[in-house]
Image (cartoon, coloured by chain):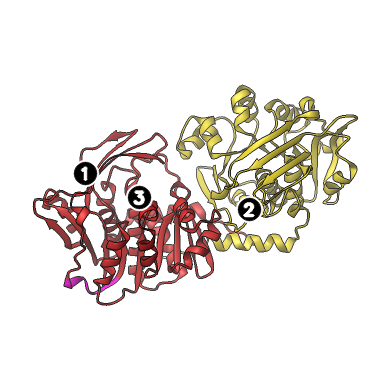
Chain colours: A yellow, B red
Amino acid sequence: MSLVIVGTVAFDAIETPFGKTDKIVGGAATFAGLAASYLYDNVKLVSVIGDDFGDDNLDILRSKGIDVEGVEIVAGGKSFFWSGKYHNDMNSRDTLITELNVLADFDPKVPASYQDCEYILLGNLTPQVQMDTLARLDNKPKLVVLDTMNFWMDVALEDLKAVLKKVDVLTINDAEARQLSGEYSLVKAAKVILEMGPQYLIIKKGEHGALLFGEGQIFSAPALPLADVFDPTGAGDTFAGGFIGYLAKVKTINFTNMKNAIIYGSALASFCVEKFGTEQLQSLTATDIQARIKQFIALSKFEISE
Amino acid sequence: MSLVIVGTVAFDAIETPFGKTDKIVGGAATFAGLAASYLYDNVKLVSVIGDDFGDDNLDILRSKGIDVEGVEIVAGGKSFFWSGKYHNDMNSRDTLITELNVLADFDPKVPASYQDCEYILLGNLTPQVQMDTLARLDNKPKLVVLDTMNFWMDVALEDLKAVLKKVDVLTINDAEARQLSGEYSLVKAAKVILEMGPQYLIIKKGEHGALLFGEGQIFSAPALPLADVFDPTGAGDTFAGGFIGYLAKVKTINFTNMKNAIIYGSALASFCVEKFGTEQLQSLTATDIQARIKQFIALSKFEISE
């Protein structure tokens, strides 16, 4: 049984108030895969890259035990490239360059060895690619998690609604939840969205944490206040990878385990933003992660006995 | 021993997407006093009103056991009046009318019977009035909580810094914490602000909850996601009143009790916003409050055992 992650494997060039990078390894599937690899040992990626990506960069993934058989390499093609500049508050950014390159014609390949897929994360891509990937699995996975963004609500809403009927968990941010539902109150927004298909909705609020809706319950997860946020790129993908990686590890899908999965996803995301790109995510230890989980427990625990 | 609350007792006229009110009873000390009265039975107000306020409106406070001896009534004067209109998102509002009236010359009177003050909430007023009130107490209270806002940072920063040296707990919102400290990271902002005098800092984040900094620790309290926010007026004051009311009740000032105090303050604030003005705060029961506290526990509790 395996966890399959579909998404971009790409190059980023990032500028923040703290510095700037040349082209470094990025992409949603990269961040999510690295995060998941700390929690589950059978992670497989579906993506597309050009032959500019380089085998040494794929080794970053392989070294964490991540299967890259499903990462198609287009001969003579160039990998997806995104360049952005963060403002001083690190919460807003300008996109400087988006080169789709090989991503423009991404037709996801699901190798035969991936048909043992039990958990799948459909990273932020066109809803049609998300749907195609699901269709290429012989069996319906036990858990389908879908990440998307406002752009697809603007340009491919009907496709998005179609794929939402097939997912168990949707992850979006608060503005996107409001856009998708037409409701300002997140409680009402969640009600509308859960009627679109998913059984669970995660609303990501960045520095304000995340909300989980499902089974008639709500869970509010804190974000760890950090002294230095160095580079927010990939935090949401890291969160999603940690989330599904934890659920793959514990196997039982219910609200209680989803809460813990959100804490693990948040903890991994908090590491991600402390360095540029995937740097911090490449070198964590189990001890690092457990120490951070303890910080989350201390951060949110209170005991009222009346 | 008593809890003294200094602040406005006033009239508000409020317009929201859900309706509008004529002049109704409002003011920071009104909201804070009502909230505190559910948790502590010796609450005393210091404020100033005109004789337009009406004894029946003071009865709203007296009926909760709140001592209004320190509420000066200026003969022929008019009470402070604020009118505002909330936008559709309920997070932003326009002030339509601000009539300071008797508040313009507020010289806080501390009756002799208030000299047993052990806990004091200095509501959002000019820092000079906050300082004067403290100076008129014969003994330093066990706990001084101060609420303020960006306006005083703009026009009376030195006075504000002077009074901050005399307080134990400061409550401000996240934008104000950034303004006061000059730091964007709330962790760094808290460090700077705690060096200005307070031992504890509460950063209020509205629908995103609150953060408590102090004793080298951080606590992140959730806000209860609500289907309908009817009128946010007074939520921050209600939070502060519930916070100090809980601490007055439990008597021991430490980080553990402060965490619970924030949950009580948040619970009372969640009631406040469900109706116009003080309506909901006038009619709560202990059962209502305990049920809401249980919702906060369910909202934020998770258990990770590894």
Assess disc 1: are there few (<14), some (14-19) or many (≥20) residues with their C-alpha within 10 Å of its C-alpha.
some
Residue B237 image offset from top left, x and y in percent:
33, 54
Say what secondary structure mark 3 lies in: helix
Residue highlighted by disc 1: B24
Mark 3 and mark 1 on one chain:
yes
Q: Type of residue at label 3?
A: Ala
- Residue A3 seen from this side: no
Residue highlighted by disc 3: B235
Residue highlighted by disc 2: A229
Say what secondary structure mark 1 lies in: strand
Q: CA distance from mark 3 to mark 1?
A: 16 Å
Q: CA distance from mark 2 to mark 3?
A: 30 Å
Q: Type of residue at label 1?
A: Ile
Assess disc 2: are there few (<14), some (14-19) or many (≥20) residues with their C-alpha within 10 Å of its C-alpha.
many
Mark 2 and mark 3 on one chain:
no
Residue A262 image offset from top left, x and y in percent:
61, 50
User: For the point 24% across and 74% down, which residue is it?
Assistant: B116
Residue range in magenta is B112-118
Residue B188 image offset from top left, x and y in percent:
55, 60
Q: Is residue B175 left or right of residue B31?
A: right
Q: Does B4 appear above or below B17?
A: below
In the image, B289 versus A51, the foreground residue is A51
Q: Is residue B86 left or right of residue A116?
A: left
